[in-house]
Image (spheres, grey):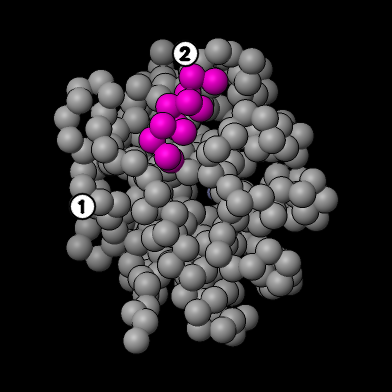
Amino acid sequence: MQTQPPVIDAHAHCGIIDRSWPQSFADYARQAAATDIAGVALFSPVQEIYDRYDAHFADTADWQRRRRESNAHLLSFNSDELTVYPYFFIWNDFAVEQLSTAHCGIKWHRHADEPMYAYGDPRCRKALAEIWRRRLPVVLEEEFGNTVRFIRELAQGITVIIPHLGMLNGGFRAIAGAGLWELENVWADTALAGPGEISSYIQSYGHRRLMFGSDFPFGDPFQELENVRRLQLAPAVENAVLGGNFIRLQAGVDHGTDRADGKRGIEGSGQ
Ligand SMILES: [Zn+2]
């Protein structure tokens, strides 16, 4: 008999600095307690990483400190109810030296009217090489042109997860038109996606690279989970989307050693 994989939320934000929303780990845990979610991939909130409202934003030591604090916060959770998979939110200082063996992925995020990633900076290529070496998946939210360039050119060999089934990366159809969904290294999450798009994705590209996500605090974990369950997918398909695929993805991450200190890292992928 096949055992059912745990339900894992592949996309949620948790913060420590930006208190304009209820988005602490306790806030998430409270909402998740009303569900059977057993694990969660956590990213920092955007506003703890850069000033998204200033297109001419210039990085400062103070923002670097903020990023460090926010990213480090995600490594500090210890919960019996929820397995936490911390993702490192990278910005354009490409601070991959802050990656540790506990990290389970990378968050790469920008909207069209926001300050840009310095794709031409040699540190960008170096960071991608380090991400590749660690076999970390990248959740990529970027405008359409940069999404295509990132996948086709910059991130070869890296697994890229397009969140919201592409809603904020140019749209589901634009990503389909660019031929990205069928690529083996391109995955997706269901956060805030409509039932039509989830069904049509599964119909066209199968269910092996699609993961349930809530986009907490923008999405309600209970509601987002219901949105997937309401589709009444075949049990094997539903299990894969709700957690099995996430577990498989994480099994590919190399938590081996930190290059900096050479110490053995955390064993396995759940911590
Ligand atoms: Zn998000």
Q: Position of residue 136 (x, y in %)?
A: 43, 40
Rendered view: 260 above or below 210: above
Amino acid type of the residue tagged 1 in the rendering: Asn
Residue 146 placement, left or right of 26: right
Q: Residue at x 55, y 27 (%)?
A: 51
Instruction: Please name the residue that numbered disc 1 is placed on.
Output: 78
Residue range highlighted in magenta? 125-136
Instruction: Please name the residue that numbered disc 2 is placed on.
Output: 60
Element type where label 2 sits in the image: loop
Rendered view: 76 above or below 37: above
Tell me if the residue at label 1 has its CB under 8 Å from ligand 1.
Answer: no
Q: Which mark is residue 254?
A: none
Q: Quadrant of the N terminus?
A: bottom left
Amino acid type of the residue tagged 2 in the rendering: Thr
Q: Nearer the viewer, residue 60 or 98?
A: 98
Question: In the rendered structure, which disc, 1 or 2, sits on the residue that comes first in sequence?
Answer: 2
Task: Look at the image and tell me whether residue 101 can be seen.
Answer: yes
Element type where label 1 sits in the image: loop
Is 134 magenta? The answer is yes
Contact check, label 1 and label 2, Cβ < 8 Å: no
Q: Position of residue 110 (x, y in %)?
A: 62, 34
Residue 13 placement, left or right of 139: left
